[in-house]
Structures are given as C-alpha cells and as structure tokens.
Image: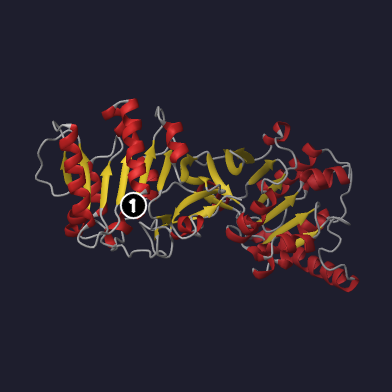
Amino acid sequence: MKMIKSIPPEVREFLEKEGGSSIFIEGASGTGKTTLGLQIIEEIADPQKSFYLSTRVSDEALYKQFPWLEEKEMRSQITDASKVFLEKLYGGEAEEEEKLDEDREKIEGAKEFLDTIREEGPPEETDRTRLNQLEKEIPGLERIYDRIDHVLPDRSTLVLDSIEGITHKYDIDMETFVMTLQKDLVENSNTNLIMILEKEEAPDLEYLGDGVIKMERYQLEGRDVRTIHLRKLRAIKIKQPSYLMSLEGGRFKCFEPYELDISGEQEWRPVESPEGKYSTGTEDIDELLDGGFDAGSYNIFEVGENVSNEEFFSVIRPIFLNFITQKRGVLTVLSGGTHPENLREDLTRFVPESQFNKKFRIVDYFSSKTDKPYKMALAGKSQSQYRKKYNETIQELKGDQEEGILDYTGLDTLEYMQGGEVAVKQLLSGVANTKNSDNLGIGIVKPGLNMSQEIKNMADNYFVILSINKTPCIYGVKPKTGLYAIVTDEERGSPYIRLDPIV
C-alpha cells in the first residue's frame, strides 16, 4: 500500500481493495472536487492505467490551474471532452484508428481462444452488456471501454468530471448512464470509477454507487474552512467521518489528528529571534508576528471548548522549550487540568532536567511547602507574603544578567483562586508591569471566563486555538490572519510544529 497522507485513509483503503469500486464526489462549485479526482489518479491509482475525462474545462485550462499535472507527466492521461466527447482519445488520426481496429481484432481473437482453456479469473475484457442496451449512442464512449480493455486484467481508474456534463450533452437519463458504467465497468470489468457531480447532493443517484463523498466550504469569522465528509464507503469501516482539508497550491490535502511523536525524542534546538523579540519556537507563528512576540507585550491564546490538552499544548510547548534552552526563566500559573508533574515530564524529554529545575517555576496555590525546585508553594500566605515570594522568584529567574522572563498565566485558575473583580485587578496590574519591562506575558483564556472582554482589550496579540474534525487549528484576531492547521514539522519532527494554511 502506498503511504499517502493527503487523502483520507478510509478512501485509500476503499479504492485499493480487491475489485472495482465507484464513488460519487459531490459538493458546491469551488469545493475541490476536481482536485480530489485528479489526485486520486496520481496518488492511489496507477496514472498509466487511469483516465480523467472532463466535460467542463479544456485540458490546457487544467494545466494552468494544476501545473503539477505536467510535472507528474500526467498529460497523456487527461482527455479534453468539452468540444467533442472523447474525439481526441486516440489522437484522431485515421491511420491510428485503422491500426487500432486491427489490433483489437487480434486481441479479441486471442481472448476468445483463451476463454476456452482458462479457468475463471480476473476479467480479460470489458463487459459491454449495458453499453449495447443504451438507446442513444454517446460518441466515443465505446473507446473508453477499448482503453480499459488494454489495461485488463489489471485494474484501471476512470474519473468522469462531470456526470451531468455528459448526460445533459447527449440527452441521456443520468440514472441509466450511471447504472451502465456501474454494471459494465465497476462490477464486471475491475474498474474504479470516480464520478464527479455538479450538485451539492444527489440522493436520487447515491444508491447506485459504492461510495459517496461530500465536500464543503464554509466561513468561520470571515475565514474559509474546507471539509470532506465520508458519507458512504461500502465494506470499509469509517473511523473518522469528516476531515479538515485545504487546496493550497492547487493540491488536495486532508489533515489527520495531531499526535506528538516521541519515538525519535530529540533535544530542543532554540529558534532565534531579532533583538527586542521573543520567538514562539515556531517559525510560522513568528512570521505572523513579524519576528516573534515583542518584549514587554501581553499576548492571549483563547482555547476552544473542544480542544484537547495535547492539541493546545502543541503551540505552548515550543514557547516554553525555547525560553528554557535560551536560559531565560519561565514563571507559570497553570490552567485547570494541567498537572505540574505531567508538565515537567513532558518538557524534560526535550531539555535537561537540571536546566528545567533552574529556569522553570510553577505556582502551587494548594501547597504551603515543597521539596520540588520548580514549584512555588503559596498556600496559606498573605497577599504581602505572596507578593514578596513572587518578586523574589522573578528576580531569581532573571539572574544576574537581568534577562527577560516569560510570565505565563492560565486565567481560569486566576479567576477561580481570586474571584472575578480581584482577578481583573490583579491581571491589570500584571499586564501593566509586563508592559513596563522586557518580560513577555502570555495569558490562556478557557471557555466560560468572566473577564474575557477585559483580556481582549488589553492584549497586544490575540490568537484563537480550536479543533476542527480532530485537527488543531489557529488563527489570529490581533493581528488578523487566515486559518491554519497545526501539524508536526516533518523535517525536524516532534515537538516542532508548522502551520499549513487552509485555502
């Protein structure tokens, strides 16, 4: 099996199983149906045994829209059917047609002989039973069957773009046409058939096919979101019914759930940043911020309700690691649900534990004493004692060089511990102190927080992290950015991430 990451694994399994299968691809205009059909030929099928037939655009228009087609040497597999359906399938030369007829006669004669001596096995020629029963002739349709004959007994793939274009052009009942291809080519001639529809849905046809895929595009806060829905794939278990997808660069790509791959654990190598900036540890986010967070800035990450800790931490982890490895201090008030020991174990996979103990501090509101060097126990302390301990810890983290530190706060914890009004006052004070220093402030906003509006107003940068079909995504409110999928950096591996634009 080919290891393909851009097409849903269920679709790959469906098209690679034994025998022919048919899929309807439906959706509104511009949702990526043509792109998916072409990439199925390139990545799942054998391009030399596959055919793409378009009734909507010319082949030259396809090459302009999808320049990778020529790079992949797929030109010979694309047939422009917009002028005369399949007229150019064999080049249109009379001599070639005569030679083809001669070859066909020899092949058919040989097959007739073989049929008398071979046991039942893969089909050697296309079944034409339904084709011969069509009341109307579709010019050149028989040539499709001829080309598939040359591929048999190997499996071929035929992409028709679109079904409406063919049936409307030749005034043929759509259901009859689909049934003809389904019976002749799919069920009896070992062919994978991809049928692209111009409709958003076609319930009157869906029962005829083995699979149905629907592609959608919608808006999220003015940003395009693209999804692919696996509505039916006969005999295949659909583990994930919907995937986030993108059409960047004219290529179809779906995104699978994010996972931290720790099989090749590595020491974190810091990402450098310009003077007066702090890198996020992720170069793509740095680029959105014109080089990174400004020293003395306060920055908010709003985390959606359906975002898992691992999805959210895929963005935060690189920030922590980058500070620690550059020998800069980190002071944290963790969000609810994040355990200090789990955080320590996570980060010390990528930085030495001694360095973590020296430069990382976690505020513990529930302990009055601790033997852990990275914990700051504050339970039972008065406000003045708390402030004194806090200032001492900041100075310890800054060190003799007075390096700027990262002041990280899970604002849900702050609101829970201090109450709404007190928390807002404490936050305003903390933000003011940060902006009058060379420190970096980061606040984490979880759903249901009462002081959300005050936080938005004071933030220098504001990002939203959400999960779409089990894929973590991020977009900027300040600065305003497009929507990006969060994925593992394939070159450097975990825990480095990169952002893939959803276009």
Image quadrant of residue 378?
Answer: top left
Q: How is the image coloured?
A: secondary structure
Q: In this image, 108 relative to 349: left or right? A: right
Q: 64 and 81: which one is in front? A: 64
Q: Which residue is drawn at 53% across and 48% down?
A: 479
Q: Which residue is drawn at 68% across and 52% down?
A: 189
The total of numbered circles placed on residues is 1
Residue lying farthest to the front in this orientation: 436
Residue 202 vs 152, above or below: the answer is: above
Do we see residue 265 in this rendering?
Answer: yes
In the rendered image, residue 417, in percent from the top left (x then y), is placed at: 26, 29
Image quadrant of residue 305?
Answer: top left
Q: 259 and 34: which one is in front? A: 259
Q: Which amino acid does label 1 sit on?
A: Ser
Do we see residue 239 in this rendering?
Answer: no
Q: 449 and 419: which one is in front? A: 419
Label 1 Cα crowd, 10 Å radius (few <14 / some 14-19 / many 20+): some
Q: In this image, 346 relative to 281: left or right? A: left
In the rendered image, residue 13, in percent from the top left (x then y), is placed at: 52, 49
Q: Which residue is drawn at 34% across and 26% down?
A: 421
Q: In this image, 410 relative to 164: left or right? A: left
In the rendered image, residue 407, in percent from the top left (x then y), is placed at: 30, 47
In the picture of the structure, the residue carrying the numbered disc 1 is 437
Q: In this image, 477 relative to 446: left or right? A: right
Q: What element carries label 1?
A: loop
Q: 26 and 113: which one is in front? A: 26
In the rendered image, residue 214, in percent from the top left (x then y), is placed at: 63, 40
